[in-house]
Protein backbone atom coordinates (compact mmCIF):
# COMPACT_ATOMS: atom_id res chain seq x y z
CA UNK A 1 0.00 0.00 0.00
CA UNK A 2 1.43 3.41 -1.02
CA UNK A 3 1.96 6.28 1.38
CA UNK A 4 -1.03 8.23 0.09
CA UNK A 5 -3.31 5.20 0.40
CA UNK A 6 -2.04 4.59 3.93
CA UNK A 7 -2.70 8.20 4.87
CA UNK A 8 -6.22 7.96 3.49
CA UNK A 9 -6.85 4.74 5.36
CA UNK A 10 -5.66 6.20 8.66
CA UNK A 11 -7.91 9.20 8.10
CA UNK A 12 -10.85 6.88 7.43
CA UNK A 13 -10.07 4.98 10.63
CA UNK A 14 -10.00 8.23 12.61
CA UNK A 15 -13.34 9.29 11.12
CA UNK A 16 -14.83 5.91 11.98
CA UNK A 17 -13.55 6.26 15.56
CA UNK A 18 -14.97 9.77 15.81
CA UNK A 19 -18.42 8.67 14.63
CA UNK A 20 -18.28 5.73 17.05
CA UNK A 21 -17.49 8.03 19.98
CA UNK A 22 -20.24 10.50 19.09
CA UNK A 23 -22.77 7.64 18.88
CA UNK A 24 -21.54 6.08 22.13
CA UNK A 25 -21.75 9.36 24.07
CA UNK A 26 -25.20 10.08 22.66
CA UNK A 27 -26.52 6.62 23.55
CA UNK A 28 -24.83 6.34 26.91
CA UNK A 29 -25.32 9.81 28.32
CA UNK A 30 -27.38 11.73 25.77
CA UNK A 31 -24.26 13.87 25.35
CA UNK A 32 -24.00 16.29 22.45
CA UNK A 33 -20.62 17.92 21.93
CA UNK A 34 -20.44 21.72 22.09
CA UNK A 35 -18.95 21.78 18.59
CA UNK A 36 -17.86 19.32 15.95
CA UNK A 37 -14.79 17.37 17.17
CA UNK A 38 -11.54 18.35 15.44
CA UNK A 39 -9.32 15.76 13.76
CA UNK A 40 -5.62 16.46 13.31
CA UNK A 41 -2.92 14.23 11.89
CA UNK A 42 0.29 14.31 13.93
CA UNK A 43 3.64 12.56 13.91
CA UNK A 44 4.18 9.78 16.39
CA UNK A 45 6.93 10.71 18.82
CA UNK A 46 8.87 7.56 19.52
CA UNK A 47 10.97 6.87 22.57
CA UNK A 48 12.76 3.53 22.99
CA UNK A 49 10.51 1.94 20.38
CA UNK A 50 7.29 3.06 22.06
CA UNK A 51 4.92 5.93 21.41
CA UNK A 52 5.13 8.88 23.76
CA UNK A 53 1.82 9.92 25.39
CA UNK A 54 1.95 13.08 27.46
CA UNK A 55 -1.31 14.36 28.88
CA UNK A 56 0.14 17.69 30.00
CA UNK A 57 0.69 18.57 26.33
CA UNK A 58 -3.02 18.21 25.62
CA UNK A 59 -4.45 20.36 28.41
CA UNK A 60 -1.53 22.13 30.05
CA UNK A 61 -3.00 20.84 33.29
CA UNK A 62 -2.94 17.55 35.22
CA UNK A 63 -4.48 14.89 32.99
CA UNK A 64 -5.43 11.24 33.20
CA UNK A 65 -4.28 9.00 30.37
CA UNK A 66 -5.58 5.53 29.46
CA UNK A 67 -4.87 3.35 26.48
CA UNK A 68 -5.54 -0.01 24.88
CA UNK A 69 -3.64 -1.76 22.12
CA UNK A 70 -5.06 -3.63 19.15
CA UNK A 71 -3.49 -6.75 17.63
CA UNK A 72 -4.05 -8.80 14.49
CA UNK A 73 -4.46 -11.98 16.56
CA UNK A 74 -3.69 -13.56 19.91
CA UNK A 75 -0.19 -14.61 18.79
CA UNK A 76 0.70 -10.99 17.98
CA UNK A 77 -0.76 -10.01 21.33
CA UNK A 78 1.45 -12.52 23.15
CA UNK A 79 4.48 -11.16 21.28
CA UNK A 80 3.47 -7.57 22.03
CA UNK A 81 3.45 -6.84 18.33
CA UNK A 82 0.74 -4.17 18.24
CA UNK A 83 -1.18 -3.12 15.15
CA UNK A 84 -2.59 -0.02 16.77
CA UNK A 85 -3.20 1.98 19.90
CA UNK A 86 -6.09 4.07 21.17
CA UNK A 87 -5.22 6.61 23.85
CA UNK A 88 -7.61 8.85 25.74
CA UNK A 89 -6.74 11.96 27.72
CA UNK A 90 -9.13 13.59 30.17
CA UNK A 91 -8.19 16.70 32.11
CA UNK A 92 -8.12 15.89 35.82
CA UNK A 93 -10.77 18.49 36.66
CA UNK A 94 -13.20 16.94 34.16
CA UNK A 95 -12.91 13.22 35.02
CA UNK A 96 -15.65 13.35 37.67
CA UNK A 97 -18.13 15.39 35.56
CA UNK A 98 -17.51 13.19 32.53
CA UNK A 99 -18.04 9.98 34.49
CA UNK A 100 -21.25 11.47 35.88
CA UNK A 101 -22.45 12.51 32.41
CA UNK A 102 -21.87 8.93 31.25
CA UNK A 103 -24.07 7.70 34.12
CA UNK A 104 -21.41 5.81 36.02
CA UNK A 105 -21.49 5.72 39.83
CA UNK A 106 -19.79 8.76 41.44
CA UNK A 107 -16.04 8.66 42.03
CA UNK A 108 -13.89 10.45 44.59
CA UNK A 109 -11.78 13.13 42.91
CA UNK A 110 -9.17 12.82 45.65
CA UNK A 111 -8.67 9.12 45.01
CA UNK A 112 -6.07 8.84 42.24
CA UNK A 113 -6.78 5.16 41.63
CA UNK A 114 -10.51 5.84 41.25
CA UNK A 115 -9.76 8.68 38.82
CA UNK A 116 -7.46 6.43 36.78
CA UNK A 117 -10.07 3.69 36.82
CA UNK A 118 -12.76 6.12 35.59
CA UNK A 119 -10.56 7.14 32.67
CA UNK A 120 -9.77 3.47 31.97
CA UNK A 121 -13.43 2.43 31.99
CA UNK A 122 -14.15 5.14 29.41
CA UNK A 123 -11.19 4.06 27.27
CA UNK A 124 -12.40 0.47 27.42
CA UNK A 125 -15.94 1.18 26.18
CA UNK A 126 -14.64 3.47 23.42
CA UNK A 127 -12.13 0.85 22.26
CA UNK A 128 -14.73 -1.92 22.39
CA UNK A 129 -17.23 0.11 20.37
CA UNK A 130 -14.54 1.03 17.82
CA UNK A 131 -13.51 -2.61 17.48
CA UNK A 132 -17.13 -3.55 16.77
CA UNK A 133 -17.44 -0.66 14.29
CA UNK A 134 -14.40 -1.99 12.41
CA UNK A 135 -16.07 -5.37 12.01
CA UNK A 136 -19.31 -3.75 10.88
CA UNK A 137 -17.23 -1.72 8.40
CA UNK A 138 -15.90 -4.90 6.79
CA UNK A 139 -12.58 -5.16 8.62
CA UNK A 140 -11.18 -8.21 10.38
CA UNK A 141 -11.80 -8.81 14.05
CA UNK A 142 -8.87 -7.49 16.10
CA UNK A 143 -7.72 -8.57 19.53
CA UNK A 144 -7.83 -5.87 22.17
CA UNK A 145 -5.70 -5.54 25.30
CA UNK A 146 -7.05 -4.59 28.70
CA UNK A 147 -6.65 -0.90 29.51
CA UNK A 148 -3.70 0.76 31.25
CA UNK A 149 -4.01 4.02 33.16
CA UNK A 150 -1.63 6.81 34.12
CA UNK A 151 -1.67 10.30 35.56
CA UNK A 152 -0.12 12.92 33.27
CA UNK A 153 2.18 10.65 31.23
CA UNK A 154 2.19 7.02 30.11
CA UNK A 155 5.49 6.42 31.89
CA UNK A 156 6.73 3.55 29.72
CA UNK A 157 5.26 4.78 26.46
CA UNK A 158 2.77 2.79 24.40
CA UNK A 159 3.23 -0.09 21.98
CA UNK A 160 2.49 0.82 18.39
CA UNK A 161 2.95 -0.58 14.90
CA UNK A 162 6.58 0.14 13.97
CA UNK A 163 5.59 0.72 10.33
CA UNK A 164 3.48 3.72 11.29
CA UNK A 165 4.70 7.31 11.50
CA UNK A 166 1.43 9.12 12.09
CA UNK A 167 -1.46 9.20 14.49
CA UNK A 168 -4.75 11.10 14.56
CA UNK A 169 -5.64 13.35 17.45
CA UNK A 170 -9.37 13.99 17.92
CA UNK A 171 -10.44 16.73 20.34
CA UNK A 172 -13.90 16.82 21.92
CA UNK A 173 -15.53 19.91 23.36
CA UNK A 174 -17.98 19.79 26.25
CA UNK A 175 -19.32 22.75 28.22
CA UNK A 176 -17.54 24.99 25.67
CA UNK A 177 -14.05 23.68 26.50
CA UNK A 178 -11.80 20.96 25.14
CA UNK A 179 -12.40 18.15 27.63
CA UNK A 180 -11.38 14.92 25.96
CA UNK A 181 -8.65 14.04 23.49
CA UNK A 182 -8.50 10.67 21.77
CA UNK A 183 -5.50 9.51 19.78
CA UNK A 184 -5.46 6.67 17.29
CA UNK A 185 -2.60 5.03 15.48
CA UNK A 186 -3.34 1.99 13.36
CA UNK A 187 -1.49 -0.19 10.87
CA UNK A 188 -3.24 -1.78 7.91
CA UNK A 189 -6.31 -3.60 9.22
CA UNK A 190 -7.04 -6.60 7.00
CA UNK A 191 -10.44 -6.82 5.36
CA UNK A 192 -12.81 -9.55 6.52
CA UNK A 193 -12.55 -12.79 4.55
CA UNK B 1 -26.93 -17.38 46.74
CA UNK B 2 -24.15 -15.06 45.64
CA UNK B 3 -23.24 -13.42 42.33
CA UNK B 4 -19.56 -13.12 41.41
CA UNK B 5 -18.79 -9.95 39.42
CA UNK B 6 -15.39 -9.99 37.69
CA UNK B 7 -14.05 -6.85 36.00
CA UNK B 8 -10.74 -5.02 36.19
CA UNK B 9 -12.54 -1.66 36.08
CA UNK B 10 -13.82 -0.88 39.59
CA UNK B 11 -16.29 1.57 38.10
CA UNK B 12 -17.79 -1.04 35.76
CA UNK B 13 -18.17 -3.52 38.66
CA UNK B 14 -19.79 -0.86 40.81
CA UNK B 15 -22.12 0.09 37.98
CA UNK B 16 -23.08 -3.54 37.41
CA UNK B 17 -23.88 -4.07 41.09
CA UNK B 18 -25.66 -0.72 41.40
CA UNK B 19 -27.83 -1.44 38.36
CA UNK B 20 -28.78 -4.90 39.63
CA UNK B 21 -29.45 -3.79 43.20
CA UNK B 22 -31.45 -0.87 41.85
CA UNK B 23 -33.50 -3.35 39.82
CA UNK B 24 -34.40 -5.31 42.92
CA UNK B 25 -31.75 -8.06 42.85
CA UNK B 26 -31.15 -8.97 46.48
CA UNK B 27 -28.33 -11.48 46.05
CA UNK B 28 -25.02 -10.83 47.78
CA UNK B 29 -22.19 -9.82 45.43
CA UNK B 30 -18.64 -11.09 45.45
CA UNK B 31 -16.07 -9.16 43.41
CA UNK B 32 -12.78 -9.84 41.65
CA UNK B 33 -10.47 -7.62 39.58
CA UNK B 34 -9.07 -10.31 37.26
CA UNK B 35 -9.31 -13.99 36.48
CA UNK B 36 -6.63 -14.88 38.98
CA UNK B 37 -8.43 -13.20 41.86
CA UNK B 38 -11.71 -14.67 40.62
CA UNK B 39 -10.32 -18.22 40.78
CA UNK B 40 -9.43 -17.64 44.43
CA UNK B 41 -12.92 -16.32 45.23
CA UNK B 42 -14.50 -19.17 43.29
CA UNK B 43 -12.40 -21.75 45.15
CA UNK B 44 -13.60 -20.38 48.46
CA UNK B 45 -17.28 -19.76 47.71
CA UNK B 46 -18.16 -22.04 44.78
CA UNK B 47 -20.98 -23.77 46.67
CA UNK B 48 -22.70 -20.43 47.29
CA UNK B 49 -22.32 -18.85 43.84
CA UNK B 50 -25.34 -18.97 41.51
CA UNK B 51 -24.00 -16.76 38.71
CA UNK B 52 -20.75 -15.32 37.36
CA UNK B 53 -20.67 -12.00 35.48
CA UNK B 54 -17.41 -11.94 33.58
CA UNK B 55 -15.45 -9.24 31.74
CA UNK B 56 -13.20 -10.35 28.87
CA UNK B 57 -10.18 -8.02 28.71
CA UNK B 58 -8.43 -8.20 32.05
CA UNK B 59 -4.79 -8.27 33.17
CA UNK B 60 -3.06 -11.47 34.35
CA UNK B 61 -5.80 -14.03 33.63
CA UNK B 62 -8.33 -12.81 31.04
CA UNK B 63 -12.04 -13.60 31.13
CA UNK B 64 -11.66 -16.23 28.43
CA UNK B 65 -8.77 -17.92 30.22
CA UNK B 66 -10.78 -17.92 33.44
CA UNK B 67 -13.77 -19.45 31.65
CA UNK B 68 -11.59 -22.08 29.96
CA UNK B 69 -10.41 -23.12 33.41
CA UNK B 70 -13.88 -23.13 34.97
CA UNK B 71 -15.54 -25.33 32.35
CA UNK B 72 -12.93 -28.04 32.91
CA UNK B 73 -13.65 -28.39 36.64
CA UNK B 74 -16.84 -30.40 37.28
CA UNK B 75 -17.40 -28.83 40.71
CA UNK B 76 -17.84 -25.35 39.17
CA UNK B 77 -18.57 -26.03 35.49
CA UNK B 78 -22.32 -25.92 36.15
CA UNK B 79 -22.25 -22.31 37.44
CA UNK B 80 -23.78 -20.12 34.73
CA UNK B 81 -21.44 -17.51 33.26
CA UNK B 82 -22.55 -14.34 31.52
CA UNK B 83 -19.92 -12.36 29.62
CA UNK B 84 -20.14 -8.59 30.11
CA UNK B 85 -17.64 -7.14 27.68
CA UNK B 86 -16.89 -3.99 25.71
CA UNK B 87 -16.12 -6.23 22.70
CA UNK B 88 -19.42 -7.33 21.27
CA UNK B 89 -18.78 -8.71 17.82
CA UNK B 90 -20.42 -11.93 16.63
CA UNK B 91 -16.96 -13.47 16.38
CA UNK B 92 -16.27 -12.70 20.04
CA UNK B 93 -19.64 -14.16 21.02
CA UNK B 94 -18.88 -17.29 19.01
CA UNK B 95 -15.44 -17.62 20.62
CA UNK B 96 -17.03 -17.38 24.07
CA UNK B 97 -19.65 -20.02 23.17
CA UNK B 98 -16.97 -22.30 21.71
CA UNK B 99 -15.14 -22.20 25.03
CA UNK B 100 -18.33 -22.55 27.04
CA UNK B 101 -21.26 -24.07 25.14
CA UNK B 102 -23.45 -23.44 28.20
CA UNK B 103 -22.70 -19.72 28.26
CA UNK B 104 -25.64 -18.01 29.93
CA UNK B 105 -25.48 -14.86 27.84
CA UNK B 106 -23.31 -12.13 26.38
CA UNK B 107 -23.87 -8.48 27.26
CA UNK B 108 -22.06 -5.66 25.53
CA UNK B 109 -20.93 -2.56 27.45
CA UNK B 110 -22.42 -0.04 27.62
CA UNK B 111 -25.65 -1.91 28.30
CA UNK B 112 -29.15 -0.84 29.23
CA UNK B 113 -30.20 -1.88 32.78
CA UNK B 114 -33.30 -3.73 31.52
CA UNK B 115 -31.20 -5.65 28.98
CA UNK B 116 -28.82 -6.78 31.76
CA UNK B 117 -31.70 -7.78 34.01
CA UNK B 118 -33.45 -9.77 31.25
CA UNK B 119 -30.34 -11.85 30.65
CA UNK B 120 -29.49 -12.57 34.28
CA UNK B 121 -33.02 -13.10 35.66
CA UNK B 122 -33.33 -16.80 34.68
CA UNK B 123 -30.18 -17.60 36.64
CA UNK B 124 -30.99 -15.92 39.93
CA UNK B 125 -31.49 -18.17 42.96
Image: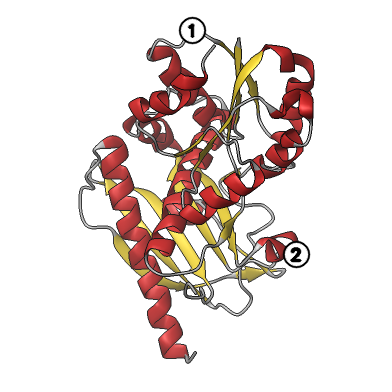
| Tag 2 and tag 1, C-beta contact below 8 Å | no
Q: In the picture provided, is B124 more to the left or to the right than A136? A: right
Q: Are marks 2 and 1 on the same chain?
A: no
Say how the picture is coloured. Answer: secondary structure
Front in this rendered view, residue A38 or B116: B116
Q: Which residue is depicted at the point 51% across and 29% down?
A: B11
Residue bearing mark 2 = A79
Which residue lies most toward the bottom here? A2
Front in this rendered view, residue A156 or A124: A124
Q: Is residue A146 something one can see in this rendering?
A: no
Q: Secondary structure at mark 2?
A: loop
Q: Position of residue A115 (x, y in %)?
A: 52, 33
Mark 2 burial class by Cα count in 10 Å: few <14, some 14-19, many 20+? few
Q: Position of residue B76 (x, y in %)?
A: 73, 25
Q: Which residue is depicted at the point 67% across and 52% down?
A: A155
Residue bearing mark 1 = B26
Disc number lying in front (2 or 1): 1
Front in this rendered view, residue A56 or A2: A2
Question: Label 2 lies in what chain?
Answer: A
> Mark number for residue A162?
none
Q: On the image, which quarter does residue A133 sit in? A: bottom left
Up the image or down, A170 lies above or below A154; here it is below
Q: Position of residue A129 (x, y in %)?
A: 42, 51
Mark 1 burial class by Cα count in 10 Å: few <14, some 14-19, many 20+? some
Q: Is residue B77 something one can see in this rendering?
A: yes
Up the image or down, A131 lies above or below B13; here it is below
Up the image or down, B88 lies above or below A80; here it is above
Q: Which residue is depicted at the point 79% across and 21% down?
A: B43
Q: Secondary structure at mark 1?
A: loop
Q: Which residue is depicted at the point 77% across and 23% down?
A: B75
Q: Position of residue A83 (x, y in %)?
A: 59, 69
Front in this rendered view, residue B35 or A41: B35
Amino acid sequence: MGNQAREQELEQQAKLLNETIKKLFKERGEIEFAKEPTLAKKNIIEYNGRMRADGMEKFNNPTYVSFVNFYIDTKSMEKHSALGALVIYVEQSYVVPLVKKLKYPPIDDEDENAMKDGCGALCNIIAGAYKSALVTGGFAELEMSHFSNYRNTAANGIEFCFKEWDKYEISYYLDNEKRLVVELTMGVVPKRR
Amino acid sequence: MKILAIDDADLERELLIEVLKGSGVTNEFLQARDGDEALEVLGKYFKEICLILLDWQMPKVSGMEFMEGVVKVPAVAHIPIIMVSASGTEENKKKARDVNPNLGGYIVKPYKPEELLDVIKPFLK
